[in-house]
Amino acid sequence: MVLTIRNVTKRFPGQTAETAVLRGVSLNLEGGRSLALTGESGSGKSTLLHLAGALDQFDSGEIEIGGTCLSGLSDSQRAALRRRDVSLVFQQFNLIPSLNISKNIAIHARLGGRWDEGWEKRLTDRLGLTGLVRRYPEQLSGGQQQRVAIARALAVRPKLLLADEPTGNLDETASAAVMELMLELVRESGTALFLVTHSEAIARMLDQRLHLRHGTAA
Amino acid sequence: MTGTALLAILSHWRRHPLQLATLIAGLALAAGLWSAVQAINAEARASYARAAEQLGTAGLARLVPETGSIPIARYGELRRSGWKLAPVLEGVVSFDRQSFDIMGVDLLQHPQAPVLAEAAEAESSTALEALRPPGRIFAHPETAALLSEAQQIHPVTRLAALPRGIGMADLSLASQLLRQPDSLSYLLVLPEQTPGLVPLSELAPDLTLIPARAAASDTARLTDSFHLNLTAFGLLSFAVGLFIVQGTIALSLEQRRGMIRTLRSLGVPMRLLSGLFATELAAIALVAGIAGLAGGYVVAAALLPGVNATLAGLYGASVDGTLSLRPGWVLSGLAMTLGGTFLAGSQSLFALWRLPMLASPATHARGQQASRSHVTSAICGAACISAGLMVFSFFQGLVAGFAFLAAVMLGAALLLPLLISAGLSLGAHMAKSALAEWLWADTRAQLPGMSLALMALLLALAANIGVGTMVSSFRLTFTGWLDQRLFAEVYVTAASDEQGAELAQWLDEQEITALSRRYHDTRFKGAPLRVYGFEDDASYRSNWPLLDAVPDVWDQTARGEALLVNEQLARRHKLAPGSILEIEPGWRLPIAGVYSDYGNPNGQAMVSLQALLKHVPGLPNRNFGLSTGPLEVSGLIKSLREKFDIPRENITDQATVKARSLEVFDRTFVITAALNLLTLGVAGFALLTSLLTLWSQRLPQLAPVWAMGVTRRQLAAAEVLRSLLMAACTAVLALPLGLVLAWVLLSVINVAAFGWKLPMYLFPLDWLRLFVLALLAAVIAAALPAWRLSRIDPADLLKVFANER
């Protein structure tokens, strides 16, 4: 099991146990499989995604990534986990404007010490980025930037890929194309995909689905 | 509509109080240092003017001799032709080893006559009594106390209306004290003259008429260059402060682009918006200007003693009185703040004016955009430097020198972003790890936001290197010069001519070489000139610091066939070996050599003692330089004191004179060091404010890197490293600029300001110290943002991804 979430709760300052953003959520996700996390705005989707990515700390419960329990990990241990085993794709792409596309794609893999030139080339070819690698993010369209973000996330060959509305900025056609490509690559690399979306169409494309309502699984 | 739009615009500051504080602080700093310098200058000039007024010479034209003095008979002739003139004889007299400036005037006719008479009457005397032997000296109470203590022959009347350090007496007494009978220094042309007189130019073609406005006192004339130096420093600090302001204004307008777009789409015209932004800037400038004035007053009050020490050290001048609020510098401070604010904001306001209604909000200059702006800035920089070089090639003098410096410094500042960008690109190419690669690239991406602060740092560091090199070179030259010039081991002053003669005889008997030091004060082209008579001795031939000379300089001079002049006299009047100098009417000698004479603002000449005594007989013979073995100094001093009862203060050994001279030298440059430090402080503050204002824009760039597994602590360390990298690049580039500045100061500004050219020495240890200081400033500036980053809540970083910011 790549991702195991057991009875996790999370409260932000000012929230009570009753109004906590997450109230005992659990799920399991295997490598090569994908899970869509859906729910209304404010239901805790992004928070759960952040917790699963070792970006934030939960109040109770447990999260395991590739067998490593997140509770009790120090800041640097969590960072090391993110470098090697977890990748993220966000709606805003969050590319690094000062690096060209080639370096943007390679940076996470190189930080994690898992850079493979051949794999990177395959990714850029598959994602149609080959002619764009010398450019800078500001010189690309939204769809192109999102494909770079996906290439960056997969270049590290993570155990777990987290995606928060990854196609939220794209039109329906582009969105479907990007999703298909991402799912194909995820399966190919044996990565578990945990994806937050509002889109019913995208949710249907994934293997599993979890709907959140007021911080609990509906 | 106007009120609503204004409220919307101003709401920005509620969300960005730090930015507002930065803007006000930057402006206040710029205005503060400028106002401080202006306050000091205004105070000094007022003090000189007050002194001139108290001496009754203010606002009066004067007739000066081309060389030497004006014979009393000549004055009589002019008076008989109907002109109302007031004669003045000036000079320095020594009482009990203390020097006093003496001004001899016609007590019955001088513009200050009523004041003097009143003062005399207040002490149960009369002005007439002051005309009779032994005469009477009028002086400021402080000077009067010193005069009364130093001599008891001539009664001293205390008169608070006179400036400190000068004694006023009737001409008869002054000519007796100065041993200059029948001669006058200049004639004041009194205001009320009978109409229809023959013009003075016809009556006295041998005398030069200096109009009232140009007839500033010697002090005011000599110190002009010093005040120009101060103004230049103030302007530099002002420019450095404006760099902070420019960056902050640009950022505040950039951050409000979204709001501007919304307001315009809601129907607020661009003209109104521009007006509102201008009003906002003016209001902020006014608040900051007032704060700057208050700060400037405090700084000026703190610096004034240092300025006094400098003026005393360089020119023997003093700034009398305490600092006061003068409309001149207060208004100039406010005007400079307002003008500076609009200058700093003009580019942003212009960009705002041209902003299309649907422009996207806050797009930061990145990659290509930034490179283009670096190239444009570098082209402007190169143009500035070229213009400076042209000024330097075609014009000479102090103003041309400062114009060249300003152009080169501004040009170098504009070239800086491109040069740093090139350095950072090189670093990125050489980087091995992904983190290093990101750090170099990200540092380059931060450059547009940091470049103004770095320009400020460049200017401050270059000013430090330049001025520091100038002062240290000066000190080194001065020390070497003292070693050369002070070749006698002991300097002694006899109480009277009789004792002087006894002393000379005793020293001769003891076979101790005693070189007599006699001089005569006169004027050359309206300025004071001291003519020394020297006895031919091997010590002079082997030690005297000659800069330029004919081959047999000492033989010619010793024979009385030629003379030596100091560098400042030579430069001021374009004299060189071979030129002829007229010391007194009819006494003309060719110049055989030019010698360095640092620290003396006035002209000086050296002739053989015989030649001097031939033209000015009866000069006092009281000062001697004694050459003896270094080990015999204390024994000789003891013998002299026992034998002749000479007070301790009248005998000085060489080491003490050198120590005193160096002490005066060091005190002279206290103000320079203070201004250097303040400018560096302003630059450090600029760096801090840039980093703090950039902070709000940094998270979107840092959060993805953090999400990829770089810890907050590593990111914080990278922030410090980035600041260090940029400061280090800037400091390295500041070195050549500083050396250019030093060279111009030593070879152009000093020559124009003081009349001497100094060799340039290099002080690598000082550079190293400054380099470390710059890095320290960078670490301190980055410490707060880095600390905040290392402690930031992950939730704040996650907001970047959640698009909730």
Image (tube, rainbow, N blue to C red):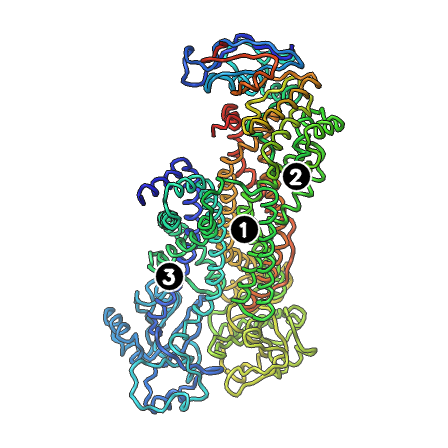
Residue linked to disc 1: B460
The secondary structure type at the circle numbered 2 is loop
> Marks 2/3: CA distance?
68 Å
In x, y percent, where is residue B772?
Answer: 60, 43
Q: Are marks 3 and 1 in contact (CB under 8 Å)?
A: no
Q: Which residue is mark 2?
A: A135
| Residue mark closest to the camera, 1 vs 2 | 2
Image quadrant assignment for residue A63: top right
Chain hosting mark 1: B
Vertical comparison of B183 with B642: above or below? below
Asked if the residue under mark 2 is in contact with the one under mark 1, i.e. CB atoms within 8 Å, the reply is: no
* Residue type, mark 3 in image: Asp
- Residue B567 seen in the current view: yes
Residue flagged by tag 2: what amino acid is it?
Answer: Arg
Q: Assign a secondary structure to mark 1.
A: helix
Tag 3: Cα neighbours inside 10 Å, few (<14), some, or many (≥20)? some
Q: Looking at the picture, how far across and down is residue B604, in whole percent? A: 54, 74
Specify whether disc 1 shares its chain with disc 2.
no
Q: Which mark is residue B85?
A: none
Q: What secondary structure is found at the residue carrying circle 3?
A: loop
**Contact check, label 2 and label 3, Cβ < 8 Å:** no
Residue drawn at (32%, 90%), measured in percent from left and top? B82
Residue tagged by mark 3? B320
Chain letter, disc 3 residue? B
Can residue B645 be seen?
Answer: no
Across and down, in percent, residue B195 comes to: 29, 88
Q: Residues within 10 Å of mark 1 (few under 14, many from 20)?
A: many
How many residues crowd around disc 2 within 10 Å: few (fewer than 14), some, or many (20 or more)? some
Relative to residue B134, is residue B205 drawn left or right? right
In which quadrant is the N terminus of chain B drawn?
A: top left
